Image (cartoon, rainbow, N blue to C red):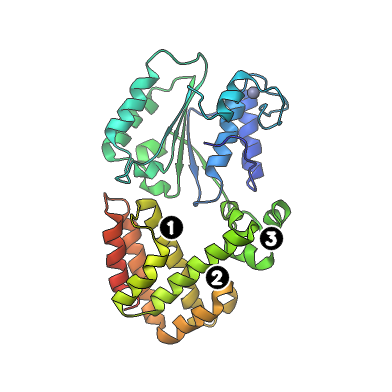
Amino acid sequence: MEYTKELIGNNLLQHYLQKQVKSGTVHHANLIIGPEHIGKTTLISNLIADLLCTQIEDELSCLARKKRGLCNSCSMLKRDNHPNVNVISPESSGRISISRMRDEISSLNMSGFLPGKRVIVIHQADCMTREASNALLKVLEEPNDNIFFFLLTENSHEILPTIRSRCAHMRMNLVSKEELRKAYDLTDDSTKVIQGLPGLAHKFLDKRKQLAYQEEIIQWILLLTEKIYSKRLVIGRKIWPKTVSREHLINYLSILEDVCRDNLMLQMNVNDSVRYVFATKELQDLQRKTSVDDSMKALELINQYTIKLNQPIQAKILLDQILLKIYR
Ligand SMILES: [Zn+2]
C-alpha cells in the first residue's frame, strides 16, 4: 500500500480516527464501507501510519507531516515493507480462501515481528469464503490490545453478520464537487464524470489519460449499439486484454451499468443526469436503436452478473455471456 497519499474528502471521518489514535481508542476491528475509488485505502493507510508512528505530533505521523527524518516505523511504511502490517486481497479465484486466512492468523502468533502494534488489512473483505470468515470471526472474538483489523468493502451486507457486529463501522461519503475542484484542477464536465470519487480524478488530470479513458467508454457504447455478436467482438478486441481478470470484469460491469443508465436517462429525457457527457453523440445513437424496456432489461442483466461475481468465476466466459445478451 501507499502511505503518503492525501485523502480528498471525508475529512470529518479522518479527523475522528486521528482523535481515536491520540486517545488510544481505535477499535480492534474496523469495517470501512464505501464505493470503489472513494479513498478507503488512503484513509486507512494514513490511519495505520498514525497508529504505528513512534514520533507522532499534532495527531499526525512523520509521513503525514512530511518530516525529513522519518521514524523507523514510518520509514518502513514508506518502503511498504513494515513487518507488522499484513495485507490480504482476493486471490485469482476472486475469493479470499481459508488457507490464506489461516496463514495470516497463524503468523499473528509467531515471533519475529517487531514488538508493538500489528495491523491486518483485508481488501474486498466481502470476498472471504464462509470458512475464511469463520476463521476470522474466531480471532475477532478474542480481541488482542495490540492487533488491529481493517476490513474494506463496497458491499458490507455480503459480510457475515457476526463479523459485522464485532466491527466499528465507518462509511465513506461521496466527495462534493467543491472539494474535488479544490483538490484538483478539473473542468465541470470532468467533475461530473468523476461523480464524487476522488480516485478517478487522476484520469482527468493528464490529457492523454483522459482521452484514453473517454475513448474506452466510447468503444463500449459503440459495442452496445452494434447488434451483431461477431462485430461486437471486433470492437471488444480494442478494449480488453487477452486475459480478462475478475478486476477487469468488475470495471467493465460498472462502465456498462453507467452507459445503460445514461441511455435510459436520454430515453426518458432526463438529459441533465447523463454522466458520460463527452460521448453524447454516441449515446444518442444508442438511444435511437434501443427502447426504455431494452435499457431496463440490460440493467437487470448487469445486476444478475454483478451478483455472480461473488462466486468463483471465469471472467472471460461471463463477459462473453453478457455480450451475447445485452441490448440484443
Ligand atoms: Zn513516524
As measured in the structure, the alpha-carbon distance from the residue carrying label 3 to the one carrying label 2 is 15 Å
Dot 3 or dot 2: first in sequence order is 3
Q: 233 and 191: which one is in front?
A: 233
Dot 2 or dot 1: first in sequence order is 1
Disc 2 target residue: 276
Residue in view at x 65 percent, y 56 percent? 176
Residue in view at x 71 percent, y 31 percent? 65
Vertical placement of 53 versus 305: above or below?
A: above
Q: Is residue 263 visible?
A: yes
Disc 3 target residue: 186
Tell me: 155 left or right of 301: right
Tell me: 140 left or right of 61: left
Q: Give the total number of marks visible in the rendering.
A: 3
As measured in the structure, the alpha-carbon distance from the residue carrying label 3 to the one carrying label 1 is 23 Å
Q: Indicate the position of residue 42 as horizontal and vertical percent values.
A: 57, 41
SS category of the residue bearing label 3: loop
Disc 1 target residue: 251
Residue in view at x 37 percent, y 21 percent? 107
Q: Which mark is residue 161?
A: none
Say which quadrant the C terminus sits in.
Answer: bottom left
SS category of the residue bearing label 1: helix
